[in-house]
Every structure is written in structure tokens, then in C-alpha cells.
């Protein structure tokens, strides 16, 4: 009777290992999709492999999910701060950043500034933000006697305009976001 018991245990162990080997041989998506002991073995094998090989990536993703101001809306529960309110505040933050970008664009690329100037002397007065005030924003076209906006001509001027635009956007948006955040914490 003890030999029968040992044979049954051996057969069970062989079946268990067979399922594990079969699960390891199959692609993870196929093995996990089957409803059988192969699926159970595959989930154990897949979990052990992913835990071993992707531990650092898993920790990084968990940290990003929990600490990112936008992703934490979906993945983190706050008892006193419901998701809809946090999502609304994220939307307000985006609107304020867009507002900062609009103001920066308006400041660096003034619409109608040059077109409203009527003589050559007046056209030469506005200074360019791209060159930090060393060059002119407008140029005079002698053919049709009109003043036109002069776009950035070099890569340095383009990079300078982009840097100034980013700085102006941050200087406009961050204080507004902070004010809205303080109002949200105190009054909502």
C-alpha cells in the first residue's frame, strides 16, 4: 500500500512538472489563455520570470503611477480628494499652461505690430525678442512701401525664441496654477 502511495505521489509530481514544462514551452499569452492546470503553472512561471527580470522596471512604473500628478488621478485613491475633482484640477492646470503659451506667443510674435506702421523710420523702431533686442522685429519693403514682420533667420534666433517662449509660459502658468491650487485646498 505504501508503494501504491509512492507511485501516486510520483505520478502527481510528474503531472505537475509536465504542466509546468508545457506552460514554459508555450508562449505566455497562449498558456495563460487556456483554462486548465497549464494556466495555473503558466501564471506561476510567468510571475517568477517577470518578478526576476523586470523588478526594476516594475518599481519604476509603480513610482510613476503613484507620484505623477496626472497618472495618480487614475491609479491612486484619496479619501478626501475624489477622482473627479483631481481630474478637474488637472484640466485646469492644462488650460493655464495653454494660456501661458498663448501669452508667450503673443509677446514674441506680435500680430499686426509691423503692418500698422506707415513709414520707414517707424518700421525700424521695434526691437526683436529673438536677438535679445539687438535686431529689428520689422523690415521695410520698398517695392510696395509697407512694413512686414521679420521672422527668425538663424537657428540660434529660433532656439532663443523657443527658450524665451518656454520661460514666459512657465512664469505665467506656475503662479496661476499655485493660486488655483491654494484656492482648491482652502475652499473646495
Image (cartoon, rainbow, N blue to C red):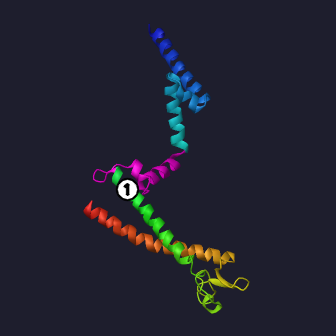
User: Considering only vertical position in the picture, is 173 above or below 64?
Assistant: below
Q: Quadrant of the N terminus?
A: top left
| Nearer to me, 5 or 35 | 35
Q: Is residue 38 left or right of residue 95?
A: right
Outermost residue toward the top in this view: 1
**Residue 19, image x and y in percent?**
55, 23
Q: Quadrant of the C terminus?
A: bottom left
Q: Is residue 179 left or right of residue 125?
A: left
The stretch drawn in magenta includes residue 152: no
Query: What residue span does the magenta drawing correspond to?
Result: 54-82
Q: What residue sits 54% from the left and 72% below the top?
A: 105
Q: Is residue 60 left or right of residue 22?
A: left
**Residue 62, image x and y in percent?**
45, 50
Q: Is residue 68 left or right of residue 150?
A: left
| Nearer to me, 25 or 64 | 64
Outermost residue toward the front in this view: 144
Disc 1 secondary structure class: helix
Q: What residue sits 64% from the left and 74% below the top?
A: 158
User: Considering only vertical position in the picture, is 172 above or below 64?
Assistant: below
Q: Which residue is mark 1?
A: 88
Badge 1 density bin: few <14, some 14–19, many ≥20, Cα 10 Å: few
**Residue 78, image x and y in percent?**
32, 51
Outermost residue toward the left in this view: 187
| Nearer to me, 19 or 162 | 162
Q: What residue sits 44% from the left and 10% below the top?
A: 2
**Residue 106, image x and y in percent?**
52, 74
The answer to which image quadrant residue 22 occupies is top right
Q: What residue sits 62% from the left and 83% below the top?
A: 137
The answer to which image quadrant residue 185 occupies is bottom left
Amino acid at each position: 500500500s505504501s508503494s501504491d502511495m509512492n507511485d501516486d505521489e510520483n505520478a502527481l509530481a510528474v503531472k505537475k512538472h509536465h504542466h509546468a514544462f508545457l506552460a514554459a514551452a508555450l508562449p505566455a499569452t497562449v498558456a495563460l489563455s487556456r483554462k486548465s492546470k497549464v494556466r495555473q503553472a503558466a501564471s506561476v512561471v510567468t510571475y517568477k520570470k517577470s518578478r526576476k527580470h523586470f523588478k526594476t522596471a516594475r518599481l519604476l512604473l509603480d513610482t510613476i503611477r503613484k507620484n505623477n500628478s496626472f497618472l495618480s488621478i487614475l491609479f491612486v485613491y484619496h479619501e478626501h480628494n475624489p477622482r473627479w475633482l483631481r481630474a478637474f484640477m488637472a484640466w485646469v492646470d492644462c488650460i493655464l499652461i495653454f494660456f501661458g503659451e498663448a501669452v508667450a506667443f503673443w509677446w514674441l510674435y506680435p500680430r499686426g505690430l509691423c503692418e500698422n506702421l506707415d513709414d520707414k523710420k517707424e518700421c525700424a523702431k521695434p526691437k526683436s525678442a529673438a536677438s535679445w533686442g539687438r535686431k529689428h522685429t520689422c523690415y521695410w519693403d520698398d517695392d510696395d512701401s509697407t512694413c512686414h514682420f521679420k521672422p527668425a533667420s538663424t537657428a540660434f534666433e529660433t532656439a532663443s525664441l523657443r527658450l524665451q517662449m518656454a520661460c514666459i509660459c512657465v512664469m505665467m502658468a506656475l503662479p496661476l496654477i499655485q493660486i488655483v491650487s491654494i484656492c482648491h485646498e482652502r475652499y473646495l
